[in-house]
Image (spheres, rainbow, N blue to C red):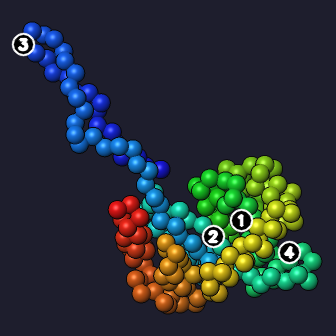
Amino acid sequence: MKYLALAAPYLFSTTAYGAILPQPPSQHTLSLAPTVKVPVVLGVMSQCPDAILCESVFNDVIQEAGDKIDLSLTFIGVTNSSDPDFGVTCKHGPAECAGNVHELCAQKYEPFAKWWRFVLCQNSQNERSKIGTPGVTLGCAAQAGIDWTASAGVCAGPNGAANGEEGLRLLRESVEVTKSLNITKSCTIIINSKQVCIRDSTWYSCEGGHRVVDFVRQIEEEYEKLND
């Protein structure tokens, strides 16, 4: 959180006699007031090429307006009670479900800088199908400075697996949240509860534009509203 700077509590002046007298605080002294960040949600699938592109765009947005947003991922899938491993069907297969679990657990337990670096590392793989595999998960966790034997890994499952009870629950809950937000395409971008753009092979439904500068502008506009 950023805080408005406080004016110096006292100003001092020297009298003709050399005495130093405290002056009262300026009437313009500002009180502490935490700012409100703009919630940004990306509806994605971990192995989806459009999600990977979208997250790349938002990595640039973060460079410009990262201190003004609260970014989170929510995952697209279909609840499937007959699925023995995840209870969810993912478009790109079980490995994608695993990747979703890994990213959800990292998102829950790690600070933003670490879990976002973890996601970008997974996205940088030469083959999207490697996302969600134990080797890539553990390697990217190490690269992001995440101790996978601690909370995020315990959530997801040991040794890069994706069978942790909490992680599976997070996946099922995320799928339901995504559905409640009327997100059906990866990647769908929501800024301050408003769906502003979709990337699905091409950009569309992007009234405010789909360039980095467009998303930054929309975020700054919402930030001003929230902190007016």
Residue 124 percent location from the top left of the image: 64, 69
Density class for disc 3 (Cα within 10 Å; few <14, some 14-19, many ≥20) is: few
Badge 3 or badge 2: first in the primary sequence: 3
Type of amino acid under label 2 = Leu
Type of amino acid under label 3 = Ala
Badge 3 or badge 1: first in the primary sequence: 3
- Label drawn at residue 16: 3
Density class for disc 2 (Cα within 10 Å; few <14, some 14-19, many ≥20) is: many
- Front residue of 14 and 117: 14
Type of amino acid under label 1 = Leu
Type of amino acid under label 4 = Phe
**24 is higher (above) or lower (below) than 90:** above
Label 4 to label 3: alpha-carbon separation: 80 Å
Badge 4 or badge 1: first in the primary sequence: 4
Q: Secondary structure at mark 2?
A: strand
Label 2 to label 1: alpha-carbon separation: 8 Å
Q: Secondary structure at mark 4?
A: loop
**Residue placed under numbered mark 2 in the picture:** 73
- Label drawn at residue 72: none
- The reply to whether callout 2 and callout 1 are in contact (CB within 8 Å) is yes
- The reply to whether callout 4 and callout 2 are in contact (CB within 8 Å) is no
Badge 4 or badge 3: first in the primary sequence: 3
**Residue placed under numbered mark 4 in the picture:** 86
Residue 209 percent location from the top left of the image: 41, 83
Q: Secondary structure at mark 1?
A: helix
- The reply to whether callout 3 and callout 1 are in contact (CB within 8 Å) is no
**88 is higher (above) or lower (below) than 111:** below
**Residue at figure coordinates x 69%, y 59% from the top left:** 108
Residue 225 percent location from the top left of the image: 37, 67
Residue 13 visible in the snapshot: yes
